[in-house]
Amino acid sequence: MNDAFDRIDPVRAWAATLAGAIIALVVGSLAFPRRVYDGFVWKYFWGPVVADGTGSTCARRVDGETVLLDGASECQRAAGVVAEPGYTTISTVSYALILVFALVGVVFLLQRLDIGSGHGFFFALFPFMLFGGALRTVEDASIALLRAGDPAIPFPWSGLLISPLIYFTVFFVTLAAVLLSVAAARRGPVDRYEYPLAGIGTAALVVTVGYLGWLANTTGLLGFHPIVSIVTLGGATLIAALAWVGTERYAPEVNAGTGYMGVLVVWGHTVDGIANVLSLDWASALGLPTYTPKHVVNSAIVDVTGALQPESVSSAIGTAWPFLFVKVGAALFVVWVFNEEIFEESPRYSMLLLVAVTAVGLGPGTRDFLRATFGI
């Protein structure tokens, strides 16, 4: 039995699993369209994209037809399969499983290219994490303009910027940048692939944020609240610095494996925490639109805090503040888990996993603070 397993090519096994999953979904959707496609694929993946991309409160699927609805009461009374913008427990778990599976595939690619085991790989990919959140904000701006009658990006093209498709969009942009950068390094124009890779990511980020600024300046429908960016980025930098100094002094083993990468992990998740607190608890004080939590964990924390915390305290400081402490604590735990032994045993997979963990916090956090900054 062990000999049989030893003869299995991991790359071919991964590719066969991917092909099998795709075939199962396609065949299942064709053979059982109401149960497989409408009840699973559409409800948890494409339906939320349709509702989000068209600016609808929800979308429903009845007899193979999609109907867009506006208003919470209409959505509650709607028959058939109903999908709302945002995440559910099933979609969140599915994304996590897809992410882990995709990471394995990327590890095989990095092994073939012989890159991705050094810290420089992590730092070079950092701008792409910010770029993903900024790109999602472009879709938010397009939806805001859609409500005024003229979207910046029409649907279904805007669907490429909405979860879960935006993950594939950013992935393929990043993959193209990696391949171009590796080719540039091996053909002589640059010494290391990390430099052009970081440059491409930074350029993509600057262009995307610049486009948001252009929309805010030319359409008159978006706002500009720089205090949100200042507080979010400044607060995250301060907290990450304090976390680094504190752990280096009292628990240096926390940073032993990640080094300065750990600072960016904490910084990225702190950006997410602060952006959520500002958007949910201080929107009216900052003159921002009203926001609601879209993530399952964030929503649960707000609900529990509101139930346990006295109303007078909630009125004074809000109910989202524990999310910041959860994010910082979780980030420090992750940094501690990624010790030297993990990187020695599987450097490429560990590096990619650390990139993914950072992006999970920084991507949504970037989107949240940019939305608030531009009043979207």
Image: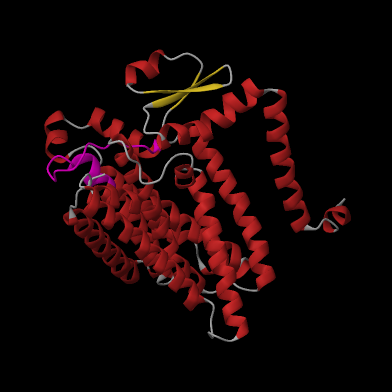
Rendered position, 181 above or below 305 = below
| Figure colour scheme | secondary structure
256, 228: nearer the viewer: 228
281, 66: nearer the viewer: 66
- Magenta span: predominant SS is loop
Instruction: Give residue 281's quadrant in the image.
Output: top left
Rendered position, 70 above or below 214 = above
Rendered position, 192 above or below 362 = below
- Rendering coords of residue 331 (x, y %): 39, 56
Q: Which image quadrant: the C terminus?
A: top left
- Rendering coords of residue 133 (x, y %): 39, 53
Horizontal relation, residue 148 to residue 104: left or right: left
Q: Is residue 293 magenta?
A: yes
- Residue located at (39% from left, 49% from top): 136
Q: Is residue 287 magenta?
A: yes
- Residue located at (63% from left, 22% from top): 35
Q: How many marks?
A: 0
Instruction: Give residue 2's quadrant in the image.
Output: bottom right
Residue 90 in view here: no
Horizontal relation, residue 313 to residue 349: left or right: left
What's the magenta region? 276-296
Residue 362 in view here: yes
Horizontal relation, residue 141 to residue 80: left or right: left
- Residue located at (41% from left, 64% from top): 204
- Rendering coords of residue 218 (x, y %): 23, 53
- Residue located at (73% from left, 52% from top): 15
- Rendering coords of residue 226 (x, y %): 18, 57
Horizontal relation, residue 98 to residue 314: left or right: right
